[in-house]
Amino acid sequence: MTPFTVNVELRLIVRGTLIVRASEIRPMSIDKPTREQLRAAADGLGVDLSDDELTGYLERMEGFARAYALVGEAPDPVPAVGQRRAPARRPRPAENRYNAWYVKTSIREEYRGRLAGKTLAVKDSISVAGVPMMNGASFLEGHVPDVDATVVTRALHAGAEIVGKTNCEYLSLSGGSHTCANGPVINPHKEGYSAGGSSSGSAVAVAVGDAGMALGCDQAGSIRVPAAWCGIVGMKPTHGLVPYTGILGVDPMVDHCGPMTRDVDNNALLLEVLAGRDGLDPRQPSTWQPVKYTAARRAGAKGLRVAVVKEGFGRHNAEAEVEGHVRSAADTLVRAGLAVEEASVPVHKQAWLLAQPIYVEGLAHSMGQSGVMPDAEGLGPGLAEKFANWSDRWRELPENVLALILFGAFVRARAPGHHYVKAQHLRRTIRRAYDETLSGYDLLLMPTTPMAATPLPDADAGPAERARRAGEMLANTGPFNLTGHPAMTIPCGTTADGRPVGMMLAGRHFDEFTLYRAAYAFERTSRQLSPACP
């Protein structure tokens, strides 16, 4: 087929008109297979074709080959990006004490919006055009996207300055902060302890004041865990409220992106900027009306009903001091005028275990069969090829990641898809249980994590300990990724040895406004009770 060149300009509607340019990209060509190649492919699948059948299938594939040639030669429309892009650089040790930063930069556009004067850190699973991206994984190092994720575009158009990409856990698959290929991220409140994951660097950058705000992503608690362990506010919005376009994920059913900030007001402000349809992410609701979340500050919270979920306490690995701070936080809500009482949601006790097949088999399928994690195709050429070759460097994978892949391969060989599909059915059962409780209450309350920050694994720690440290804290956070309910963590105290404690509130779908009403009330009342608190 004769190659062609097309000069086009497309328009996409993203809160207005967004100009999209066409890049002329010529990837690896895919030709019609030879007889020998098709025979080898069939044998590899256990399909025994006769010579006549082989000839017939080769004729049928003429159309496939033409389609692939057309796609291969066509221009690849990618969203236009701003021209003011400072080069990214690796930070000097003196400016990266806790290993929060992957690269530093300065990106701003000529806009004076609601985020004017705000500095923003971006988790390294989120695409920023012209800035390196490795999602914490050594085999992805060297990839440089040529597009911005929708959330990046929106933040820049609102006037924010992006000051760098933050280290995150290997493929964003750990609740601890020890799996990043660039080294562990250290908790700024206690040397040698975990900062939480997988948005570890984002939490630290905000906690120490290197950035006023940060973007994080959450598949099982990856915003809320590091926010809780670093003493900041982290919001996992309702599934689909914030577009995931241009962000590496784990499974489309559990991927969320949201704001991480030092206080409630900035958190609500950043979510106002991020939320809403972009016309590109099919997971988003067909209808959505803009919400001014910062107005929750004036709305008040008196009369809101809060259920302290009994099953969110008493985990086998729970710290009594953590649970004590969270129960004291519930008392503070009572002082603020909210009605708080204990309630039981029995399924919550096992909800996170019931979710495991979605993570195990989803990741195993992505990495082991297709070679591309969900959403990788939205991040530009080159990344898919890197994912396809991950097995060449499998020894570099952290123990928790390789364990997921291996067990998923084991399960797929014996009962392909059975448990994954059943877990998806159970997901609806779990969602119904929370919804039933929320029909009588406005919010659910529990510790964000059963324990405060844990020690980073020693250099000689075995695979079992390193893998355990990656997932032991997710029992309360993970279920709300499964069901899509909004959930946020708010700092509510500090252990005797200086580790922050987080209280988690969860609410009805697309009712972040009520979460912010309670969060504002808690923050305001806490400051009145302890004026010395920041």
Image: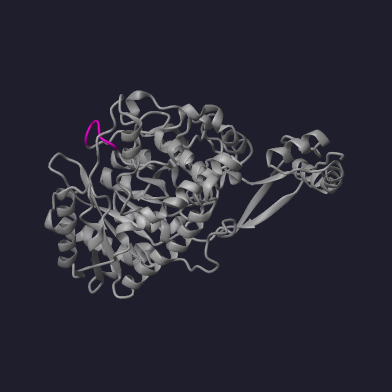
- Structure colour scheme: one colour
Vertical placement of 481 versus 373: above or below?
below
Q: Is residue 86 visible?
A: yes
Q: List x then y, in percent, for residue 395.
A: 47, 27
Q: Residue 60 or 247: which is nearer the viewer?
A: 60
Report the number of numbered marks: 0
Q: Position of residue 488 (x, y in %)?
A: 32, 56
Q: Is residue 225 magenta?
A: no
Q: Which residues are magenta?
A: 190-194
Where in the figure is residue 484, as x and y percent of width and height? Answer: 42, 60
- Reply above or below: 358 against 292: above
Q: Nearer the viewer, residue 478 or 16?
A: 478
The foreground one among 411 and 244 is: 411
| Magenta region, main secondary structure | loop
Q: Please tell me in which quadrant of the rendered image residue 283 appears.
A: bottom right
Image coordinates for residue 445, horizontal then vertical, percent: 26, 62
Q: Residue at (40%, 34%) from the top-left corner?
A: 399
